[in-house]
Amino acid sequence: MAELPKTPLLDELEKGPWPSFVTEIKEAAKHKASSRDLLGLLERSYRERLGHWKHGGIVGVLGYGGGVIGRYTDLPQDFPAISHFHTMRINQPPGWFYTSKALRQICDIWEEHGSGLTNMHGSTGDIILLGTTTPELEPTFQALCAVGFDLGGSGSDMRTPSSCVGPARCEWACYDTLGLAHDLTITFQDELHRPMFPYKFKFKCSGCPNDCVAAVARADMSIIGTWRDDIKVDHAKVKEYADKGLDIERTVIRNCPGKCMEWDGATLAIDNSACRKCMHCINVMPKALRPGDDRGATILIGSKAPIVEGALLSSVLIPFWKPEPPYEDLKDLVRTIWDLWAEEGKNRERVGEFIQRVGLGNFLSAIGLDPEAEMVAHPRENPYIFYAVGDKE
Amino acid sequence: MADKVSVDEVAEAMYKQVASAQGVKKLKPGDLNKMMAEIYGDRVDRDTCKLAIRKLIESSRCVYTYFGGSYIELPHRESAEN
């Protein structure tokens, strides 16, 4: 076995009680030349404070425009085993549920065709397989397909939809996030594998406003579970929390963003018309409070992390939607938005940036939606929406 | 109304656009769709364009590339690989 390169700077990242990616790469380096070179290159980058990767290019599998991210080092003479070190994104199952057999299959395939290094999971949600060569891409793809996996999205396409664990493991789920994410993935296979947009487009499905997949901050279209009737209260359990020492006034009432709750020391009163559905009270007293029974989702649009321009949070598009298979109403809306954005969007302009550029009022008008009060936080906060005098009831 | 143009004809027209732009300008699928609309007017629709692009890619006459965004180009050896 070849000796591992000296890595004094990387070794610092192995200190402490937490897991270290350096330790894992060293383990893989015992039997993979690519991991040995990866350690060497990374140490050199840390020493020089300079990245030595080039990314993008042509590589992919036949017929697909997404799922493979080409990576090359600019020092192939020094690190030949990673002169190509492409990343493959694999479509994760909704909610990230696997059998141990499936995980072993993925790892065995990747040991055979790639570096053996994985990232479970990437920020969009995909399984990330780190590092292979151009000739190994197609065999890897075929082997993954044979065990039921497919590539995920990359480039200017619809990215792999992701969802929280939803009703499979969470009692707060207000709709079937797993079912919706799976349905969107299957319906929009063409958009997932064949880039056709100005830039990326992400769906994220969260079952409740706790938003465990951070849809409100990261998805071009966020579908977040909510309810529109009253919070369900078990007053005996509320009293039990108080008797056990929970300071309801301090930890619940004062933290309510809608100021919709009152606590007199014996009874919790809720003005549900002012509830913001933030989930705080439910999270603090899960045995006493629950979301209502009339459950559905809010559809929001436009969030993104800072890349070309700054970060955006989502804005409400549909205040309340009943998600029911086959979700045709949502799909029709999505197709309408895509048509407009594909036609009018600039290169590398996310849909949120597009809306900012053309104005929310114009955007709504173009996709055929009426402005609603839920789209703005305060009167006149959004200068793009104008109501005619006759509109007011 | 005039007959719809065939997928094969659109694919050929797209190929010519990609070939003439090679090395000069990178074209996105949306750019090709707009070019086809200019050439064929309402005789071509977006679904036909999608099928035409698919035909070009699956026949390997064109490839998808990624340089900050996704483009359609003629197959070539990329400089990063050298």
Image: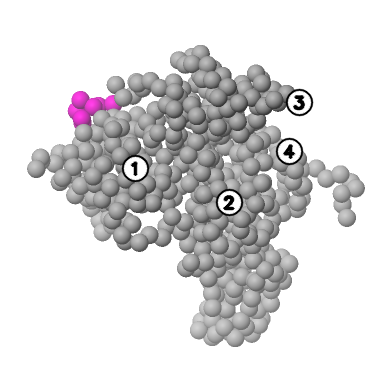
Judge depth for marks 3 and 1 and give the one in front: 3
Q: Is A128 left or right of B38, judged from the image as shown?
A: left
Q: Looking at the picture, which amino acid does disc 1 mark?
A: Gln
The numbered mark, 1 or 2, whose residue comes first in the sequence reads 1
**Camera-side residue of B36 and A47:** B36
Query: Tag 4, which chain?
Result: A
Residue under label 4: A366
**What's the CA distance linking mark 2 and mark 4?**
20 Å
| Residue A262 appears in the picture as rendered | yes
Query: Tag 3, which chain?
Result: B
Is A76 magenta? The answer is yes
**What's the CA distance linking mark 3 and mark 2?**
41 Å
Residue under label 2: A222
Judge depth for marks 4 and 1 and give the one in front: 1
- Which residue shows up at 50% across the image and 41% down it? A192
The quadrant where residue A248 appears? bottom right
Rendered view: A131 above or below A98 = above
Q: Is A92 left or right of B32, judged from the image as shown?
A: left
- Which residue shows up at 25% across the image and 27% down it? A75
Rendered view: B23 above or below A247 = above
Residue under label 1: A142
Rendered view: A178 above or below A304 = below
The quadrant where residue A262 appears? bottom right
Q: Is B66 left or right of A351, judged from the image as shown?
A: left
Query: Tag 2, which chain?
Result: A
Residues at marks 2 and 4 touching, judged by CB atoms closer than 8 Å: no
- Which residue shows up at 50% across the image and 36% down it? A194
Q: Looking at the picture, which amino acid does disc 2 mark?
A: Ser
Q: State the extent of the magenta-drawn residues as a range.
A: A74-80
Question: Do discs 2 and 4 share a chain?
Answer: yes
Q: Looking at the picture, which amino acid does disc 3 mark?
A: Met
Q: Residue furthest right?
A: A390
